[in-house]
Image (cartoon, rainbow, N blue to C red):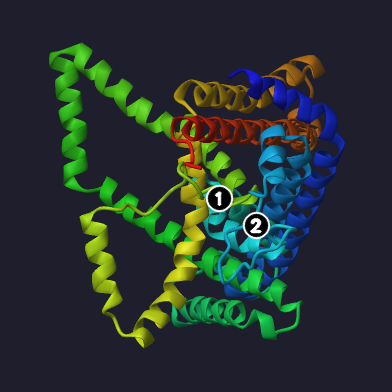
Amino acid sequence: MFSILTSTLRLAATRWPVLLALYLAGWLARYLVIEVAAFAGTTDALSAFLIMPLAILARLASFIGMFLVLRPGMPAFAELAANGEDAIDRTQDAPAAATGPSLQDLFLASILPFFAFYAAWQFLREDTLQYAATALGKINPFEDTDTSAGVLNLELTWASGAAIVLAFTGRFLLKRYNARLPRWTALLTVYLEAVWVYLTVFLISTYFAQFDAWVANRAAMHWMADLRGSVGDVFAPIGVAWDAIAWGIGEAGALVLLPVAWLALAGIVYGRALTAGPLGLRVPTNRYADRVRTRYARVPKAVSRRFMDVGAGFVGRWKPLANALTLVWRAGVVPMGIFVLAYTVIEASGAWLGFGATRLIGAHDLESWWMNVDGALIFGLDVLLEPLRICLIAAGYDYCLRRLSERRDAAAVADPVPA
């Protein structure tokens, strides 16, 4: 189970320069896109938010590139690839090919879960704040017309709604008729997918924040706060336990869910055909499922075909994520606990290294020194730790694949195929 750690160090030692180059390329592309979006945002927020998805796509492309670079150094993955299992789902949208999934398929499969993950852990908020700060810095405060209020003024209006609908419809049509279209339309398909997902996630995040603020001001929430204070005054241990439970729930996302989410994203990149066989994610075979199949068979063919056209795209977006989570779940609690602990150590080491660097550099003037140096220091630590974190994620997923192979071998021994 400690092979996750040794594999991480081995991958970092052999692939670190390439990982560093890919990370820097993604960072630079994201920075340039945000600069262009900020320039557009000084006049129209919707135009800027039609450009901002490219910044997240740049970061996603960087991560996909780093994951793909690590594939040759993953023994379990190489073994499955040698057995012909390194391939994308064999569906109408992804015909069988010995070369595996195309980059377009990887992007389309990764965009929706990656954007959702991007928003859930405040990365979308960081990009938005950087865009807003850059856009505000480009506005001349001495002009007669003040446009600063419109930099983040994106709401659900007819224009934003139409942009979402047009992007979703365009992506659906391009994906449906991709065999008849030029190859360059694959880039347009990826962009349209990113646009409708980004605008939807951004608007949901905005209105959810408003809803959360509304809930926090309700009388019931104040009653809960008063109840906690009263209980703590009467019996202090209950108040301590209450606070401990609330703290544990709040920290669970950062400590456990974030590393698992990264493993799921790696699973989408590393191949989505691992659901085949006895250990994959399967549709249940019971009387309820059989009843659904029987009733669905009675639906007119024209209606079922239209339903499959729409439903297959939706299910296809989430199926790789479900497959990856299933694989991680079956890897074992203790190995995944070691992986989560190692991920947490890498995350915390950034803060500790920053603390040590500030003590090593010593005291300097805040305005003339630290306001110019602190950004470069944080960026340098990110450059140092990000390749190591990606190596840990790849090593963790490779361990999950090895556990999958062991389970399949055990199942084959327990239930041999009759001659």
| Above or below for 121 versus 105 | above
Q: CA distance from mark 1 to mark 2?
A: 9 Å
Amino acid carrying mark 2 in the image: Ile
Amino acid carrying mark 1 in the image: Tyr
Q: Can residue 143 be spotted in the picture?
A: yes
| Above or below for 267 versus 333 | below
Quarter containing the N terminus:
top right
| Above or below for 366 versus 218 | above
Q: Residues within 10 Å of mark 1 (few under 14, many from 20)?
A: many
Residue shown at 65% from the left, 47% from the top: 270
Horizontal and vertical percent for residue 369?
81, 31
Q: Which residue is mark 2?
A: 56
**Residue with the most extreme front position:** 419
178, 120: nearer the viewer: 178
229, 14: nearer the viewer: 14
- Are discs 1 and 2 less than 8 Å apart at CB? yes
